[in-house]
């Protein structure tokens, strides 16, 4: 499962409204893990409307989240959150599978 915090839900809904896709039921948040960043792996977030055959689909807190099977192995029980504080603004992941993260929180290692 991939979880979505209340703050992340509100920001996702706001961004979908800004992109004029809030009322399009086929759109969802796609979460991926890609190589890169100072710790070796990075998170990628996009809006998407095309599911692939091996995608893993979750719905939490009224947000549909889709990830590919390979990324899901890194994301099991991860929570998508959002911060608008002074020390950092944006989406971030609370990933219990990460053995270390970089200082900016944008990349991780397992």
Image (spheres, rainbow, N blue to C red):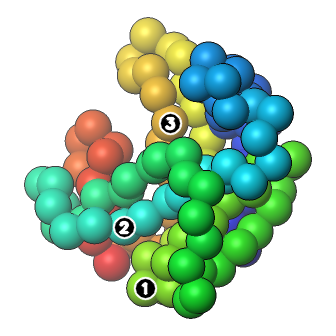
**Looking at the image, which residue is at 54% across and 17% down?**
84
Mark 3: secondary structure: strand
Q: Quadrant of the C terminus?
A: bottom left
Give the quadrant of residue 33.
bottom left
Q: What residue is shown with label 1?
A: 70
Separation of marks 3 and 1 at Cα, in angstroms: 21 Å
Callouts 2 and 3 close, C-beta under 8 Å: no
Q: What residue is shown with label 3?
A: 91
Which comes before the other along the chain, label 2 or label 1?
Answer: 2
Callouts 2 and 1 close, C-beta under 8 Å: yes
Looking at the rendered image, the disc whose residue lies closer to the viewer, 3 or 1, is: 1
Which comes before the other along the chain, label 3 or label 1?
Answer: 1
Separation of marks 2 and 1 at Cα, in angstroms: 8 Å
Would residue 78 be visible to someone looking at this image? no
Separation of marks 2 and 3 at Cα, in angstroms: 14 Å
**Looking at the image, which residue is at 68% across and 33% down?**
21
Front residue of 61 and 93: 61
Determine whether 25 is above or below 78 in the image: above
Left or right of residue 15: residue 73: left
Q: Which mark is residue 27?
A: none
Q: Which mark is residue 33?
A: 2
Front residue of 9 and 46: 46
């Amino acid at each position: 499962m991939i979880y979505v915090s209340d703050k992340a839900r509100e920001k996702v809904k706001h961004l979908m409204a800004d992109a004029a896709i809030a009322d399009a039921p086929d759109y969802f948040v796609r979460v991926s893990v890609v190589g890169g960043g100072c710790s070796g792996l990075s998170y990628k977030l996009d809006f998407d409307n095309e599911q692939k055959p091996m995608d893993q689909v979750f719905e939490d807190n009224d947000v549909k989240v889709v990830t590919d099977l390979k990324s899901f192995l890194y994301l099991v029980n991860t929570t998508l959150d959002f911060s608008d504080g002074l020390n950092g603004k944006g989406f971030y992941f609370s990933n219990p599978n990460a053995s270390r993260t970089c200082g900016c929180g944008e990349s991780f290692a397992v």
